[in-house]
């Protein structure tokens, strides 16, 4: 097991190095001078310009710049934002809990609806319910979520007035110091009445929007995996023993049917983060996705570089974790290859 | 619909050709046939956009700005689906948008399938260091969330229709490379390949003529589904203002332009999204049918 873990971890190392290389090169390929962004367009004296270049390390040879960059990353320095002058890592860390909160909530939504829907569709195969679930899943899977978000805002927020249009909290009514960064937890711990409800209220639409594609995928995978499991001998045995259908399906079949579902959840983290970029933009959700898009608008390339580096590293490590976990569950994978 | 189609071909006498056989399996899936019909319709609209669309997609009727569609109060038959904020006919823009979206989807598919075949086969046949390098690069591309990578590429190249295609191609390339490499590796060990090699078939011929045709089925399915993914991704970039630039009638950027009218003129927001959804659903339905038809093992599951 340990050897498998080590080998799998070693495989991600070159990917990680290449990622650093590519983010480094990419930002240098971007048109526009970083110094110009910082100084504005009015122009400054040549001495100041040289000083800026020196501060940013731009007067060094390129290979030296790259080594400095790698050295910085290994020490947790992902650069400094040109616009706010804050460390990219700090900005990222402040905003990331909002993205995690949204993503977890979306995944929870997808699993809580997708698994039962897929299971029932498999058990009642060919029924109108099955057809509805499969039809809805094709539509969900094909959904342009940025439009879906606008549509929901239009109906639920604007026409029916049920949910807020944007943001994470009613900031006029409530304020408290962030302790965990997860507003649901922070507002729960604060003594302000209604703050928790307000946070929950703000979370509803973004959750649905971000959770739609994972929901469609999970319902589909659950259904097909359940159909396979229902044909297995042990399910027949359980039935023959006279166990109630609920027990057979809920306990014997579902447990085994969920393995591919769990794998797919792990692998969807990338999809989720990509979807978060759109969802956060639509709902003005102050997370890393919205921050990244704003970084492009402001031509804040160090922020962009650091942000992409951080997001990709997270995806790499989560995928590594999923693989290792899967190896722990499935011994065939560990010893094979 | 399915019953008609399977009864229609007079292939009942004698063994069926592979094409008739394929059509039988495909048409068994009613959703797939519906998807195909819808897709053909959209494709026809796109091809004959200049003839079908009542106006030019960029002609501005300033005095009719934000005219509602014909079924709403104040709608006229002159602009069946209404006009946008600049008074451009929505119907014409949507029809021409189909052309833009299908063009992006197909270009991305053709380019990434071609590069995918070449790199995948080369990696499978060469093995060793080349294989490792190619596959590690693909791993790297997969590690970056799709839209984030596309954003990075567009940030470097600048937003335009062509660069959208480049960005989305980069994002979806690894799928094809991995798929071709995996199916080629499965084929290389088989007897017929060894036989061909023994007879003295050259390397290039072995790759493209002997092995490739046997890897095509999964590739075709992936390519079909890849078109819809590319259309969605390109629309998302357009929505973020990083895709096709105005006045090109791209569905995603049409949505972005209309965000501020969400309260007052909902049709400007609703219609482009519906167009994206219909197109992507029809391609995905068809892709499902293709998969069923190509892979009997997966059928009806």
Image: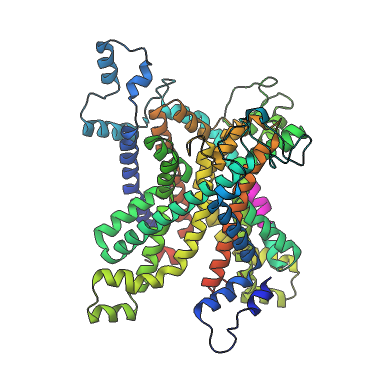
Judging depth in this view, the residue of B122 and B6 nearest the camera is B6
The one nearer the camera, B63 or B283, is B63
Is A145 placed left or right of A55 in the picture? right
Magenta segment, prevailing SS (helix, strand or loop) = helix
Q: Residue at x 26, y 34 (%)?
A: A66
The image shows residue B137 at horizontal and vertical percentages of 34, 51
Q: Is residue B139 visible?
A: yes
Q: Which residues are magenta?
A: A107-116
Quadrant hosting residue A82: top left
Q: Would you place residue A231 above or below residue A17 in this image?
A: below
Q: Position of residue B299 (x, y in %)?
A: 58, 72
- Front residue of B47 and A225: B47
Relative side of A100 to B172, left or right: right
Q: Is residue A106 visible?
A: no
Q: Quadrant of the C terminus of chain A?
A: bottom left
Q: Residue at x 31, y 48 (%)?
A: A14
Where is residue A135 drawn, in percent x and y? 67, 58
Q: Residue at x 66, y 60 (%)?
A: A134
Report which quarter residue A186 is drawn in: top right
Magenta highlight on residue A170: no
Residue A166 place in picture, x, y as percent: 64, 30
Q: In this picture, is A94 found above or below A258?
A: above
- For the image shown, how many numbered marks are present on the structure? 0
């Amino acid at each position: 097991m340990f050897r498998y873990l080590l080998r799998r971890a070693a495989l991600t190392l070159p990917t990680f190095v290449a990622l650093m290389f590519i983010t480094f090169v990419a930002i240098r390929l971007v048109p526009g001078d970083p110094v110009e962004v910082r100084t504005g367009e009015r122009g400054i004296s040549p001495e100041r310009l040289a000083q800026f270049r020196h501060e940013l390390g731009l007067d060094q040879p390129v290979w030296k710049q790259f080594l400095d960059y790698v050295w910085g990353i290994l020490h947790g320095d992902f650069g400094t934002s040109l616009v706010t002058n804050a460390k990219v890592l700090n900005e990222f860390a402040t905003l990331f809990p909002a993205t995690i909160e949204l993503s977890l909530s979306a995944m929870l939504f997808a699993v809580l609806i997708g698994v039962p829907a897929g299971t029932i569709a498999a058990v009642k195969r060919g029924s109108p319910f099955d057809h509805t679930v499969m039809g809805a899943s094709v539509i969900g899977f094909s959904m342009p979520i940025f439009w879906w978000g606008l549509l929901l805002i239009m109906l639920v927020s604007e026409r029916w007035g049920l949910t807020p249009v944007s943001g994470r909290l009613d900031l006029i009514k409530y304020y408290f110091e962030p302790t965990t960064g997860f507003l649901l937890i922070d507002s729960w711990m604060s003594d302000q009445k209604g703050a928790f409800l307000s946070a929950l209220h703000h979370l509803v639409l973004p959750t649905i929007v971000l959770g739609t594609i994972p929901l469609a995928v999970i319902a589909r995978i659950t259904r097909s995996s359940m159909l396979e499991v229902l044909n297995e001998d042990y399910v027949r045995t359980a039935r023959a023993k006279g166990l109630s259908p609920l027990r057979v399906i809920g306990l014997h079949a579902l447990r085994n049917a969920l393995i591919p579902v769990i794998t797919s959840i792990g692998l969807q983290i990338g999809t989720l983060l990509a979807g978060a970029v759109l969802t956060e933009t639509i709902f003005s959700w102050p997370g890393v996705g919205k921050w990244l898009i704003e970084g492009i608008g402001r031509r804040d390339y160090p922020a962009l570089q650091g942000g992409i580096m951080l997001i990709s590293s997270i995806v790499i490590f989560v995928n590594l974790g999923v693989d290792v976990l899967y190896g722990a569950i499935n011994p065939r994978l560990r010893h094979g290859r | 619909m399915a019953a008609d189609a399977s009864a229609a071909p007079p292939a009942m006498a004698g063994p069926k050709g592979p094409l008739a056989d394929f059509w039988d399996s495909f048409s068994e899936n009613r959703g797939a046939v519906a998807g195909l019909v819808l897709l053909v319709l959209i494709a026809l609209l796109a091809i004959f956009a200049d003839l079908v669309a009542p106006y030019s997609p960029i002609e501005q009727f300033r005095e009719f700005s934000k005219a509602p569609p014909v079924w709403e109060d104040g709608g006229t038959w002159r602009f069946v689906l209404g006009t946008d904020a600049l008074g451009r006919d929505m119907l014409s823009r949507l029809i021409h948008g189909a052309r833009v979206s299908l063009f992006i989807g197909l270009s991305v598919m053709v380019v990434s399938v071609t590069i995918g075949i070449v790199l995948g086969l080369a990696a499978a046949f060469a093995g060793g260091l080349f294989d490792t390098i190619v596959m590690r690069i693909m791993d790297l591309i997969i590690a970056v969330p799709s839209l984030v990578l596309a954003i990075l590429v567009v940030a470097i190249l600048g937003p335009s229709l062509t660069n959208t295609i480049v960005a989305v191609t980069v994002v979806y390339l690894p799928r094809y490379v991995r798929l071709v490499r995996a199916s080629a590796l499965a084929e290389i060990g088989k007897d017929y390949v060894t036989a061909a090699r023994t007879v003295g078939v050259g390397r290039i011929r072995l790759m493209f003529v002997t092995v490739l045709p046997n890897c095509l089925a999964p590739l075709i399915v992936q390519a079909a589904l890849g078109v819809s993914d590319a259309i969605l991704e390109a629309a998302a970039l357009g929505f973020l203002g990083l895709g096709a630039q105005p006045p090109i009638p791209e569905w995603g950027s049409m949505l972005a332009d209309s965000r501020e009218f969400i309260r007052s003129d909902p049709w400007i927001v609703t219609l482009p999204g519906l167009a994206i959804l219909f197109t992507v659903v029809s391609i995905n339905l068809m892709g499902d049918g293709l998969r069923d038809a190509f892979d009997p093992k997966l059928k009806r599951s």
